[in-house]
Amino acid sequence: MILLTRKIEFSASHLYHNPDFSPEENRRVFGKCNNPHGHGHNYTLEVTVAGEPDPVTGMVLNLADLKEILEREVMQRMDHRHLNYEVAELAGQIPTCENIARVIWQLLEPKINEGKLHRVRLYEAPDLFADCYRNGSNGAAKA
Amino acid sequence: MSTALKIELGRRYRFSASHRLHSTHLSEEENCRVFGKCNNPHGHGHNYVVEVSVSGDVDPATGMIANLADLDGFVAREVLDVFDHRSLNEEVPAFREQVPTTENLCIEIFERLKSFPKARLERVRIEETSNNSFEYAGENADYDREAVRQEGNRP
């Protein structure tokens, strides 16, 4: 099995706020991320697809197709947007790395028909990221 | 068939420390041959990057597997405060007996972090330099092997 990874970057703003929490609780749990005016990040997304290379093309899937899927599903939805207010799939959720990674997985999985979505890794900053995969398929390449 | 989605949170930390690769079970010549430059009796240092991955349910109220402040505090107390700007050989008890290779450092840090109370420790990955990295998942790696075996048995 081969793992193929494509990386894209997008920039977006967000804030963390739970309307069921008191203002004090929101500040305690979310810290600086609770600033009501929001703040932003340069997100880096790594999408990994697993599969066998096609004997004719030598490809797991055509990178141009993957690029187009990422453009349509992720860039157009999230790039230069406010994740709390402008991304319907995140409505009612705190837009943490964990939740955004899961939403991106759910958007991409049905669109990837050659190979199989293996991992979504979303970096909010170089030192903070979330990984999403199907349980039992734990990140590492398998024979 | 679909199985549940699994989410992990990954966080990178940094510390700088010195070490010397030397085994009391080997002769001077053997130490020199096996460890090369790393056997220099005066030691040398690295800027280590430690990547810690934890998993668990994402709390719907916070959107988080674990609060970063809790994870950062735990890693600072258990690892960074103990290792940063230290000699691994002289100041970390585990390395009085063991050679402080990054393999052994992965195991030592995994053992120190596995009791994190707010999430499950999945793995520790350490970059000794930007060219060398090492990973340890403790017994979690056995689940991986089991999954591989089962996948292999599928028709």
Image (cartoon, coloured by chain):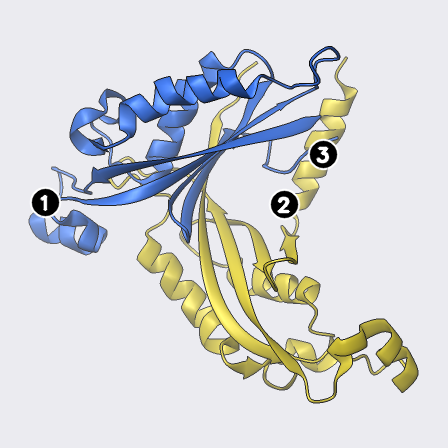
Chain colours: A blue, B yellow
Residue placed under numbered mark 3 in the picture: B146
Tell me where residue B49 appears, x and y as whole percent.
52, 62
Category of crowding for the residue at label 1, using alpha-carbon neighbours closer than 10 angstroms: few (below 14), some (14–19), many (at least 20): few
Asked whether the residues under marks 1 and 2 belong to the same chain, the reply is no
The residue that mark 1 highlights is A37
Q: Nearer the viewer, mark 3 or mark 1?
A: 1
Q: Chain of mark 3?
A: B
> Judging from the image, what secondary structure is the residue with disc 1 in?
loop
Q: Image check: B31 left or right of B137?
A: right
Q: Residue at x 73, y 10 (%)?
A: A56
| Rendered residue at 34%/33% (across/down) | A100
Vertical order, A42 against B147 (above or below) = below
Q: Are marks 3 and 2 on the same chain?
A: yes
Quadrant of the drawing holding the C terminus of chain A: top right
Residue A112 x/y as whole percent: 51, 15
> Which residue type carries mark 1?
His
Residue occupying the point 18% across, 56% down? A28
Q: Describe the element under mark 3 as helix, strand or loop.
A: helix
Q: Nearer the viewer, residue B95 or A103?
A: A103
Q: Position of residue B106 (x, y in %)?
A: 63, 61
Task: State the separation of the CA atoms marked 3 and 1.
Answer: 48 Å
Residue B33: quarter of image: bottom right
Neighbour tally class for label 3: few under 14, some 14-19, many 20 plus, Cα within 10 Å: few
User: Which residue is labeled 2 in the image?
Assistant: B140
